[in-house]
Image (cartoon, rainbow, N blue to C red):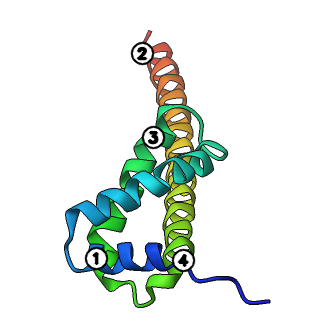
């Protein structure tokens, strides 16, 4: 059995694509909480809220490129998922970077200590 088409949603998406700010606001109000809940299941604390803002900025900037208004929910989910993945990759890289800096600092400290001892 085919899934029924949500004509109101399709109309909202089409209006938002045409630049209707009220239509975009309606989309935001309708789906913002769901995208936030999804992000909170992956990312903890205020970081999820920040990512959700990034999601909706992306939606606003790219909604005109959405080729199928009926695919809005899937498209929104993909953007949300990609923001979460990017955040994970970036946080993993930052942790690796901080770990590398910590190791370098320890090596420098050891070098300075051994260098200092040689001079005495």
Question: Where does the image place residue 41, in percent across and percent down from the top left?
Answer: 67, 45
Residue at x 42%, y 15% (from the top left corner) = 119
Residue at x 61%, y 51% (from the top left corner) = 38
**How far, Cα to Cα, is label 3 from label 1?**
26 Å
**For marks 2 and 1 on the same chain, the one whose residue lies earlier in the sequence:** 1
**How far, Cα to Cα, is label 3 from label 4?**
28 Å
Left or right, 4 with respect to 16, comes to: right
Q: Marks 4 and 2: which is nearer the front?
A: 4
Question: Where does the image place residue 26, in percent across and percent down from the top left?
Answer: 36, 58
- Residues at discs 3 and 1 in contact (Cβ within 8 Å): no
**How far, Cα to Cα, is label 1 from label 4?**
14 Å
Residue 6: give its label.
4
* Residue position for label 3: 49
For label 2, count other residues whose C-alpha is less than 10 Å away and answer few (under 14), some (14-19) or many (20+): few
For mark 2, give the secondary structure: helix
For mark 4, give the secondary structure: loop
Q: Marks 3 and 1: which is nearer the front?
A: 1
In front here: 88 or 23?
Answer: 23
**For marks 3 and 4 on the same chain, the one whose residue lies earlier in the sequence:** 4
- Image quarter hosting the N terminus: bottom right
For mark 3, give the secondary structure: helix
**For marks 1 and 4 on the same chain, the one whose residue lies earlier in the sequence:** 4
* Residue position for label 2: 119
Q: Marks 3 and 4: which is nearer the front?
A: 4
In front here: 74 or 106?
Answer: 74
């Amino acid at each position: 059995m085919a899934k029924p088409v949500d004509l109101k949603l399709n109309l909202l998406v089409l209006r938002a694509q045409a630049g209707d700010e009220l239509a975009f606001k309606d989309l935001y109000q309708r789906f913002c909480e769901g995208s936030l809940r999804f992000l909170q299941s992956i990312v903890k604390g205020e970081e999820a809220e920040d990512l959700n803002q990034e999601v909706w900025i992306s939606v606003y900037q790219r909604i005109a490129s959405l080729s199928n208004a009926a695919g809005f929910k899937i498209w929104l989910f993909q953007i949300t998922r990609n923001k979460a993945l990017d955040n994970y990759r970036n946080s993993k890289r930052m942790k690796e970077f901080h770990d590398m800096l910590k190791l370098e600092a320890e090596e420098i400290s050891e070098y300075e200590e051994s260098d200092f001892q040689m001079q005495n």
